[in-house]
Amino acid sequence: MVHFVGAGCGAADLITLRGKALLEAADLVIYAGSLVNPELLRYTKESCEVFDSSKMTLEEVIAELARAESCGLTSVRLHTGDPSIYGAIREQMDALDRLGIGYDVCPGVSSFCGAAAALKAEYTLPAVSQTVILTRMEGRTAVPERESIESLAAHGATMVLFLSASMTGELSRRLIAGGYSAETPAAIVYKATWEDEKVCRCTVGTLEETAKANGITKTALITVGGFLGNEYELSKLYDAGFSTEFREAKT
Ligand code: SAH
């Protein structure tokens, strides 16, 4: 059996109880060494074999998982944040399907949640935005044309950009071309929930100089939108004049 486990986005105690139990029971762990907190490996038992996937190809990862499976061992494939976001787990699951190896997935705290916590922000403020767009600039991985930064920016919704911290100049220009004003609030969150976390508040127009001034080129999210401002409406959920399934309105 193979368990894909979300490690959380930084602090070791952000892994789920289930994820920790799976790590404790694992005979083999393949972890994403580039971003997973190595402190998590302390949860593994002494006999556990540990591999760093940042130095491996897909074929090598699958070969190790298949070898463990043939010996009746339990494996954990430990991914940063939540495995469903830029985790490249689909290709691994499909390969395991072809080999007839069973697997399941344990979610984790994605960095976009860690970044919101670092910012002490709510992405979905009433009358500001009710939509969160998680996307990226294209790098060596292409982004479909219909998902260009310009076209997504046109919604004026909350945007969280992964894998784009080294391209803040171009990002800023394209966000503005899409419709955000240069004054729209933005923030760069570096290593959310790690000990060396850094939160840099700025605007869409000053993303590049802010990244440069703080020496940030990777392991950061760029968040954009009115949710970082001060204007919003109160929620209906806790409005005294609003009845819900659980509470009568106080008239
Ligand atoms: N599955 C991960 C994302 C992997 S893609 C998740 O759910 O978070 C890797 C990108 O995620 C990095 O380039 C960076 O943009 C972002 N990232 C990962 N961990 C981060 C953290 N602690 N703080 C800020 N950004 C992070």
Image (cartoon, rainbow, N blue to C red):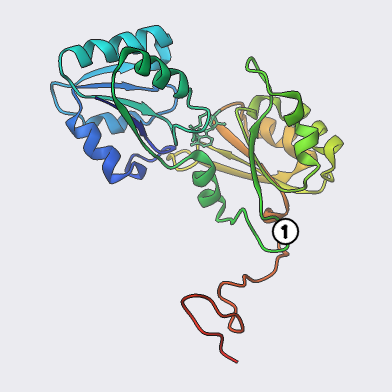
Q: Judge from the rendering whether residue 33 lies leftward or rightward of residue 147; answer left or right.
A: left
Q: In terms of depth relative to the viewer, which is nearer, 210 or 62?
A: 62
Task: Where is residue 207? Give x, y as percent.
Answer: 73, 37
Query: Which residue is at a point 78% across and 48% down the rendered structure image?
Result: 184
Q: Nearer the viewer, residue 1 or 122?
A: 1
In the picture as drawn, the residue positioned furthest to the left comes out as 47
Q: What residue does disc 1 label?
A: 128
Q: Residue visible at 70% across and 55% down?
A: 129
Q: Secondary structure at mark 1?
A: loop
Under 8 Å from ligand 1: the CB of mark 1? no
Q: Residue at x 56, y 80 (%)?
A: 243
Q: Is residue 91 above or below residue 153?
A: above
Q: Is residue 4 left or right of residue 172?
A: left
The image quarter containing residue 6 is: top left
Query: Which three-letter amino acid code belongs to the residue tagged 1?
Result: Val
Determine whether, in the image, residue 124 is placed left or right of residue 80: right
**Image quadrant in which you'd find residue 83:** top left
**Where does the N terminus fall, quadrant-wise?**
top left
Q: Report crowding for label 1: few under 14, some 14 to 19, many 20 or more residues within 10 A (C-alpha).
A: many
**Could you tell me residue 161's position as x and y percent?**
64, 35
Tell me residue 157's x, y (percent). 72, 48
Quick check: 226 above or below 53?
Answer: below
Percent x, y for residue 200? 63, 43
Question: Which residue is located at x 56 percent, y 75 percent?
Answer: 238
Quadrant where the C terminus lies?
bottom right
Q: Quadrant of residue 137 in the image?
A: top right
